[in-house]
Amino acid sequence: MLALDRVSKIYPNGVEALARFSAEIRQGEIIAIIGGSGCGKSTLLRAIAGLDRASSGTVTLDDEAITSPHAKIGIIFQEPRLLPWLSVADNIGFGLADLPAAERREKVARALERVGLADKAQAWPRELSGGQAQRVAIARSLVPQPEVLLLDEPFSALDAFTRRDLQDHLLDLWADTRPTLILVTHDVDEAVVLADRVLVMRPRPGRLFDQIEINLGRPRDRNAPLFENFKRSVLTSLDRSLDRNVPDRDATQGPGQAMWW
Amino acid sequence: MTSDAPVLQQTLEPAESTAAPSRAAHYARPLLGILLPLTLALGWELVVWSGWSNGRLVPPPSRVFATIADLARSGELIRHVAATLWRVGLGFAFGVVAGTVLGAISGYWSLARRLLDPTVQALRAIPSLAWVPLFILWLGIFETSKIALIAVGVFFPVYLGVMGAILSVDRKIVEVGRTFRLSGFAMIRRILLPAVLPAYVVSLRVGLGLGWMFVVAAELIGASEGLGYLLLDGQQLGKPAQILAAIVIFAILGKLTDWLIEIAAAPFLRWQDAFSRARGA
């Protein structure tokens, strides 16, 4: 379980990016974090990844405090961030340097197969399309089998069709080992398609505003009326989060509090 | 020359429209570059041959090559070339080592950069030839002062290149290294070195170019052998063919050594190469 306990971040210039964010995330759960700009989504994700340290509060994974990048936590950024001097296969195997070569090759080959890029193994990252590159990035972070995978607006730079394709693909890959997924997004559609639970944040300072359970089976039909209902409730919550007249609620209780309107 | 223009277009177009240029176009490309100097040389040869000019101050190519052949036959050429190559090689080696080490330190540690860089930049502002009298006083008029001068010339572009390359490594790529928990040596080997390499190779080539420039300066000042000595000797004895011969050999050696760096670096920069090839360049 991933536990966030009153995580706060104040930048050296005095900006309070994140204020007392608490949440408990079960192993294998898919969480979407959504909110207006400047609500501290990325700050939160970087704190969980151990890339930045929280000013106060703790992030713990299975009772282990996270203060620096951890083997059990992987991250996918908005850009693929592939290493241009490594072939696609070597990029995917980047996190497996400690394994014997044969084992590494085998894992990389399987991952390439899994993301449908087996024929691109020896290609350079420059030769890939945006969607292909992001698939390589997903494979690269999944190959070491992390318990938690963080995704920072991973599909926002892609066209709508490729984005849908990759969302489905991500769920498919997730089903293999069922890591915890924490996805920062500003696409309501994406949040409802993927997540078990949507956390809505509100800005200045960034804090948790609301959480909405998405009680829908998978695979989800984007055109089902129930799907539309969930989308609407996330949108309503988002709107309220940006309305200064709506007071903060204590949204830190567990699930079950979701459909409060 | 006008009649050549259509030929030029014909050889270029198929090469750029397809990924694999035809064999003829592949070989025609370097030949195109030789066309201009070759035409000029032949033209001048013709002018002198037909008697329009006596070619005393600007000897025709045939006389320049005859001079080179004479020098080669007497063994002089090898002696001068070896002396110059030795100086450039040693000076280049010292300059590259110093430039790489200090450049890497300045690029990696901001404290060292604040401490070191202003001094280096101030030294860089001094025209390097201004060091000559001091070097001669300190190191004598023989090899040491020459090699030191060449090393100074090579040092600055390499230092700047390494420091700049390290400073401009994409922070986002470094972050990828951090998420995979690379630290210290592994980060340098797996992220920084490959990221810096293209710019480093460029700075080596610039440094080598300056090394060739400074070897001439060093040899003009006082030497009894070397290509620079050939230049000076040709001037004092009024032998323009010998000067031109030395210049031609400088050009050949400069191009050759530059090409060696390119060849040596090519296997490590294939990922860049693939990009330019994909665009048909």
Image: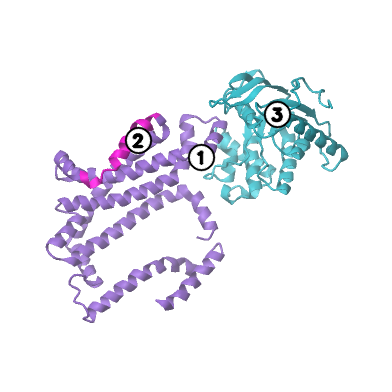
Chain colours: A cyan, B purple
Give the quarter of the figure containing the N terminus of chain A. Answer: top right
- What percent of the width, then of the height, locates residue A20? 66, 20
Q: Amino acid at mark 1?
A: Asp
Spot the residue most to the right: A225
Q: Residue A121 versus residue A39: which sits nearer the camera?
A: A39
Mark 2–mark 3 Cα distance, whole angstroms, equals 45 Å
Quick one: SS at disc 3?
strand
- What percent of the width, then of the height, locates residue A156? 67, 42
Mark 2–mark 1 Cα distance, whole angstroms, equals 21 Å
Count how many numbered circles sit on residues in the image. 3
Foreground tag (1 vs 3): 3
- What percent of the width, then of the height, locates residue A241? 74, 30
Crowding at mark 1 (Cα within 10 Å: few <14, some 14-19, many 20+): some
Q: Which residues are magenta?
A: B111-130
Which residue is pictured at 34% across the width and 30% down the height?
B115
The residue under label 3 is A202
Instruction: Give the image quarter of residue A147.
Output: top right
Between disc 2 and disc 1, whose residue precedes? 2
Residue A220 in sight: yes
- What percent of the width, then of the height, locates residue A91? 57, 41
Q: Is residue A261 above or below residue B36?
A: above
**Are marks 2 and 1 in one subunit?**
yes
Q: Chain of mark 1?
A: B
**Are marks 2 and 3 in one subunit?**
no
A54 with respect to A115 (left or right): left
Q: Which mark is residue B117?
A: 2
Spot the residue most to the front: A245
Q: Amino acid at mark 3?
A: Arg
Is B13 contained in the magenta span?
no
The residue under label 1 is B170
